[in-house]
Image: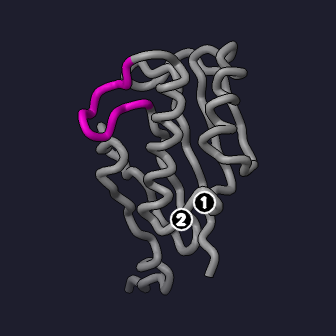
Amino acid sequence: MRHEHPHRHRIEKVTTPEAPSPVGPYSQGIKAGRLIFVSGQIPLDPRTGKMVEGDFKKRAERALLNALAIVEAAGGSLDSVVKVTVYLRDINRFPEFNEVYEKVMQGRRPTRAVVGVSGLPAGADIEVEMIAFLED
């Protein structure tokens, strides 16, 4: 006999047209109770589904904004973000990324990890994931 877990209904899929549609078997985000987990976002334009053209800073901004759009769709905001993980194909772009990050995060300083990686989906040079916490 299976017991329904009392909190099972508190896990919800988060979707928004303000971020790219998933290109695989995953959700844009998951809201689990008061936590929001955002899948890694690459610099795809949510309107076209294509990689953002131009310089690295534009792509970094798009990846961050895609992740934030999912946080917002779940009821969160910039202030809700508690953890950011960033994957860079070229770790030497760290200073450029930091410039964009400061601007987008508007002085907020959640915990963060930045990792240099050898490759990312769709040939992207940056991927960003976030965890956010909703107040009561």
Q: CA distance from mark 2 to mark 1?
A: 7 Å
Q: Is residue 102 a member of the stretch shown in magenta?
A: no
Type of the residue with mark 1: Ala
Q: Residue at x 49, y 46 (%)?
A: 67
- Is residue 123 visible from the viewing direction of this image? yes
- Which mark is in front, 2 or 1? 2
Give residue 47's position: percent from left, percent from top: 26, 39
Q: Residues within 10 Å of mark 2 (few under 14, many from 20)?
A: many
Query: Which residue is more in the foreground, 27 or 68?
Result: 68
Give residue 103's position: percent from left, percent from top: 64, 38
Q: Main secondary structure of the magenta part?
A: loop
Decide: marks 2, 1 in contact (CB < 8 A)? yes
Q: Is residue 44 a member of the stretch shown in magenta?
A: yes
Q: Secondary structure at mark 1?
A: strand
Query: Which residue is more in the foreground, 128 or 68?
Result: 68
Answer above or below: position of 70 versus 22: below
State the mark number for residue 32. none
Q: Residue at x 48, y 43 (%)?
A: 65
**What colouring method underlies this structural image?**
one colour
State the mark number for residue 132. 1
Count of numbered labels shown in the rendering: 2
Residue designated by label 2: 76
Q: Which residues are magenta?
A: 43-53
Find residue 94 and report its image quarter. top right
Give residue 96's position: percent from left, percent from top: 66, 21
Q: Residue at x 39, y 50 (%)?
A: 28
Q: Residue at x 64, y 36 (%)?
A: 101
Find residue 95 and report its image quarter. top right
Left or right, 119 with reference to 17: right
Q: Secondary structure at mark 2?
A: loop
Find residue 128 and report its image quarter. top right
